[in-house]
Image (cartoon, rainbow, N blue to C red):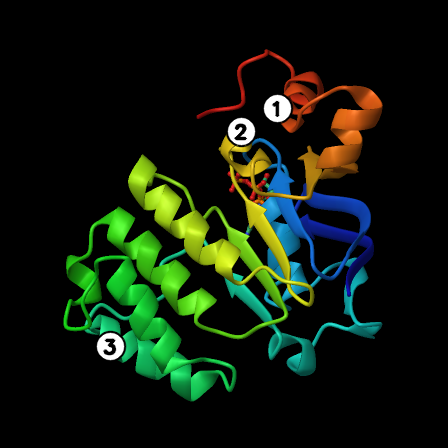
Amino acid sequence: MLECREITKVYGRKTAVDHVSFKLEQGKIYAMLGPNGSGKTTLMKMAVGLVKPNSGGFYYNGEPVGPRSRREVAYMSTEPYFYSWMTIKDVGKYYDDFFDDFSMEHYGRLIERMELSEDMKTKSLSSGMMAKLKIAVTMARQAKVYLLDEPLNGIDLLARDEIIRSVLEAAGEDTTLVISSHLVDELEKVVDAAIFMKESHLVEMVGVEALREERGKSVVDLYREIYGHGGEATC
Ligand SMILES: Nc1ncnc2c1ncn2[C@@H]1O[C@H](COP(=O)(O)OP(=O)(O)OP(=O)(O)O)[C@@H](O)[C@H]1O
């Protein structure tokens, strides 16, 4: 459904993504893994057309990504993107105006479950509350593909559970999820496959079950093997 063909992105002298190709299947959940600066965010941004590749490209159902795919692919960026004057309710209205697949009702339920309230101002939110808001507003879309860039970053354990629960609710036969995170062992429990990026290259994309059955390894084992030092996987 979402395919990356020989994609390359260069910023000045830095190659952020180098001839990367992979195909994402419908109904699967993927972890996007790799150390800082390995190209994960750049890949996600290219998948939604926010960054233009130098060569190669992303294809959604066989067509180059563009306005049509953007209607079906939801992206949650690491950057804050709400105006400070907005209340949580305003954020919902803004998304509702922008995306046909956005459900104000679902948004309200997610906000309540995240223990946020609609009259809170975005500028007064803690970083954990902001992370929850970003997830709520992204997952309130009925998209076909969700690309979530570091949704668990800096979030306490209980809030992480809530975020993961809300994200997994969207999982289904016709939905594809990609989650980038440095919390490798936490992600391993919920994903079907992992994409390993290193220094702008795709090292490999591997199914969690196949990895366990055929190679007797966990995603954390493979992470340690690929990135070395034995200690990159954090909990
Ligand atoms: N706008 C930009 N201008 C210049 N260089 C950039 C830009 N965006 C990313 N880069 C560089 O491209 C490389 C890949 O960055 P990217 O943000 O994709 O990595 P990442 O794997 O998402 O990292 P992290 O885990 O830290 O979020 C890095 O070396 C980064 O410094």
Residue at which label 2 appears = 185
Disc with the residue nearer the chain's start (1 vs 3): 3
- Indicate the amino acid at tag 2: Asp
Which quadrant does the N terminus fall into?
A: bottom right
Residue visible at 61% across and 45% down in the picture:
40
Residue at which label 3 appears = 89
How far separated are the C-alphas under marks 1 and 2?
6 Å
Q: Disc 2, ligand 1: is the CB inside 8 Å?
A: no
> Element under label 3?
helix
Residue 161 in picture, x, y percent from top left: 38, 43
Q: Disc 3, ligand 1: is the CB inside 8 Å?
A: no
Q: Is residue 46 left or right of residue 233?
A: right
- Indicate the amino acid at tag 3: Lys
The reply to whether the C-beta atoms of the residues labelled 3 and 2 are less than 8 Å apart is no
Disc with the residue nearer the chain's start (3 vs 2): 3
The reply to whether residue 41 is visible in this rendering is no
Question: From the viewer's perspective, is residue 146 above or below residue 35?
Answer: below
Q: Is residue 92 left or right of residue 186?
A: left
Residue at which label 1 appears = 220
Residue visible at 40% across and 41% down in the picture:
153
The reply to whether residue 155 is visible in this rendering is yes
> Element under label 2?
helix
Which quadrant does the C terminus fall into?
A: top left
- Indicate the amino acid at tag 1: Val
Q: Disc 1, ligand 1: is the CB inside 8 Å?
A: no
From the image, state whether disc 3 or disc 2 is nearer to you: 2
Residue 154 in picture, x, y percent from top left: 34, 39
